[in-house]
Amino acid sequence: MAKQDKMLLAFNRGVVSSRGLARVDLERMAMSAEIQKNFVPRVLGSMMLRPGTAYIGSCYEDLNRVRQLPFVFGVDDTALVELNSGGVARIRIDDQLLERVAVSTTITNGGFGSGLTGWIDASDPGAFAWNDGGINAILRGNGTNYARIRQQVTVAVPDQFVAHGIRISCGTGTVFRVGSSAGDDDYIPEQILNGGTYDFEFTPGGDFWIELANGKDYNVFVNDINISGAGPVLFFHPYSSDQDILNVRYDQSGDVMYLACKDTDQRKIERRFNSRSWGIVTYRPENGPFKVQNTGPIAMSVSAIQGDADWSLSFEQAPVILTATAPYFEAPQHHGALFRLESSGQVVTESITSPPSDEWTNPIRVTGSEEARRFGIIIEGTFTATVTLQFAFTEDGPWNDQGTTWTAPTDTSFLDGQDGQIIYYRIGVKVADYTSGTVTVTLNYSGGSIQGICRVYEVTSSTTAKVRVLQPFGNLLPTKDWWEGEWSNQSGWPSAVAIHEGRLAWGGNEKLILSESDNFESFDDQLEGDARTISRTIGQGPIRDINWLLSMARLLIGTTDNSHNVAAMRMDGNNPLSARSSNFDEPLTVSNFNIKTISSKAVFVDRTEQRLYELLYDIDVQDYKSVDLSVYAPDFNVAGITHIAVQMKPDVRIHCVREDGTVGMLVYDRLENVICWIDIEMGLYNSVPNGWVEDVCVLPGREEDQVYYTVIRNTGPSGLGEERYLEKWALESEAIGGAINKCVDSHVVYDGAPTSLLTGLDHLQGLTVSIWADGADKGTAQVTIFGTPGELDLSGLAGAPFSQVVVGLPYTAQFKSTKLGDINGLSLLEEKKINRIGFIAENLHHQGLQYGPDFNNLYDLPAVEDAQVTPADTIYGRYHEGQFGFGGEWDSDSRICLQAQSPRPCTILAALAEMESIEKRGRR
């Protein structure tokens, strides 16, 4: 007979696959587990009954699938964006929904159903504001002057110094401001809005003025503007199915979050001038990106060099028409598509009325020699002004007067005689030279070319489409030199997004496209130098679907070759990104911005949906490599992983939400060789798991990161009602006992005057809850479902009434060791018996831990310590007592099983067991 001590020095090795249970020859296996559920280890080696989750609130329309997106501007400046598959979004700040209070203030005719009644037209000369028949307000500037409408809004005395919300739905380019006087912006600073819906908050001290304006030479629509109604602020988005919600990828820069989703156009979530003003809008860059140049026989032309349809009942300017020489356009697939046309020759024109500053045409570029340099000058209109011609040696200036001026209409030409030189010319009126009237000036040059850009807003036939001119064209003649935009319903939309090296990267449909450097809204491929936009086609492998992009030392791309459609996550911060490492055959720019010396780590789910891989930079091979983090438990996530989120504090913990509603948590530290998988299951109802985790999200925190689960729970006496709740992990420091001990799920905390009745527990109605009151476990009770739902009667509990109460759903933590054997594995098949066991623990409820050979035969900790009966609800700050009887029997497969039950806190630092074994010398 041999005797040996079995010491469980650490609990940070986690679950090992059943296929590896016999590998006791491996040092880590001696401290691994077959089961480790709801016992959360620390990298240092202890494990504790996990903290409970706090009930934050119900999700909107709880039958719809939900994603929580982390909005992180700083550690103390965060928000949660809730997207559901019903197309609705809500914002939470400090765990509170963004809401508006009720006020009596109203905006007159905010829906523009009565034309512009109630609004003052304060447009500059040459700019117009009108209504399109009771649907929208339309604002049209002329490139310099602004169309502008204003309204003074009366605020009743009781509503003064009360926070107001203003909700506006509009098109891209609307200029919006709110001030205490006409034209002022002391309440809401001037905002240039994108197309979509915003909800601004401000606090007026009295009456205020609203102003809407547009200076662009195309129409901007304002659908409606009203005082926000009382209650939660709702926004709307296009992700209207469960799969869409799962496919959303995002990255954030400052106050803007960029969203991508397969088969759906891009969106932006914008936070404006304060933390309570938000909007969800379309992402619509106006200068690209474009596909390769047309090489087919189809030519295209436009009906006007610049402008837009006026849509007015009083004047009938025709819309600008884009015409193809053969069938090309498809409705509605081409709605919103960009087109760029390059003219042969250059025509620029400008109509000038009451300019607020010097006003000029766009420049023309003159090259060649002799007569090839001659260009035409046309001046038209009834005016009192002096027209000036200027020149420069670069398109951006500096500009100099050529010396020739005109004060009357003319049609002439100009030859500069500067043979062989590249010179730019423009014509216009200086503000000091203008007196009255409207003057239209035009330069017409047969050489060179101009590239104009337009966006389709209506396809009228297979050969014609109505367009809005975003960049003036060079002439009206058909041209085969044209480019179609990369993104539309016809061409497809990006499926992934990331910010990398000061550029916004979009990936999808075999392409990777990056914006100009430090300009996320610009894709000018005509720009010279390394700052220009980058567009590359991925050349090999399964490339159609890009699951994610990840910015590390290189920009990494996750395709179906080795990654599942779950977003990859960085492990050196809290920035969730929406990726396989792809190399390009050539640098992305001549200076190869794609290389830097600082590297980081990331994790992603492979194509099996079961295994997690670490992506890290290998200095030996000077490239990234993937490391299997599931090597010891390859079947641990066999249910399939749907979401991952990385928690950085207090340890690196990777939460992997599974298809079956449970969570696989990986506690990870490469330096300490900690790769520890454990199970997380939510609270119970009648011994049946009641919580189905659907989503996870992490926000940074000072002491610990904030971890949020979206949980589907069943309510009612038969568990028939299905609800979706947002729940937040308590801090470890809040789950160690004391007056308020947060060791139950979906919990609510009461801290106030002594009471015997808790109300407001509607999310727990009909369920049996655990009660921790005034520092003690008070057992269980049922929350009412009939009569007044959501009440909990505490009057029958000893010690009632209570001042500090935590109620919620209980859960169990379990640990089952691997097979016990000596280091050589020789005792695996021998009869073994565990005689005694002892624990080193802290923050331990005196009845908070059970032990035994299996979970059907468990024993409580001794009720007598040091010859004294332990008082009820004692919590040991430090527990280091001698060993006691284990209750084991002779068995060839002896195990150590530990169990803790909420709400009783339990933290185990180590366990020491005394084991006997008998060597088998023959068959029994």
Image (spheres, grey):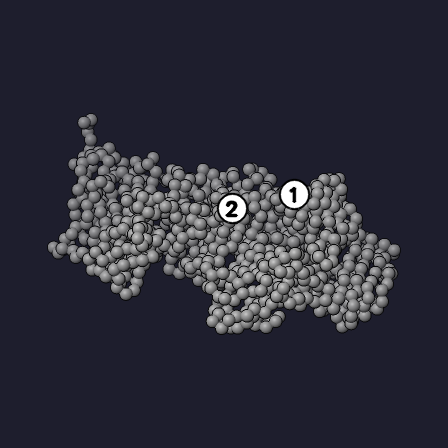
> Is 77 on the left-hand or right-hand side of 418?
left
Nearer to the camera, 30 or 74:
74
Name the residue furthest top: 923
From the viewer's side, name the closer residue of 819 and 361. 361
Q: Is residue 248 left or right of residue 359?
A: left
Q: Secondary structure at mark 2?
A: loop
Q: Quadrant of residue 298 in the image?
A: top right
Q: Amino acid at mark 1?
A: Ala
Q: What residue is drawn where x is 31% and y is 37%?
A: 21
Across and down, in percent, residue 754 comes to 26, 64
Label 2 environment density (alpha carbons within 10 Å; few <14, some 14–19, many ≥20):
some
Query: Residue 331 — which label?
Result: 1
Instruction: Please give the count of numbered marks on the rendered protein.
Output: 2
Label of residue 712 in the image: none
Tell me the distance, in whole angstroms, between the alpha carbons under discs 1 and 2: 22 Å
Residue 596 image offset from top left, x and y in percent: 54, 53
Where is the C terminus found, in terms of image quarters? top left
> Toward which corner of the image does residue 36 lie, by quadrant?
top left
The answer to whether residue 878 is left or right of residue 317 is left
Do we see residue 294 in this rendering?
no
Q: Earlier in the sequence, mark 1 or mark 2?
A: 2
Q: Residue 132: in sight, yes or no?
A: yes
Residue 359 in the image: above or below residue 605 = below
**Mark 1 touching mark 2, by CB under 8 A?**
no
Residue shown at the point (19%, 29%) measured from the top left? 921
Q: Which mark is residue 240?
A: 2
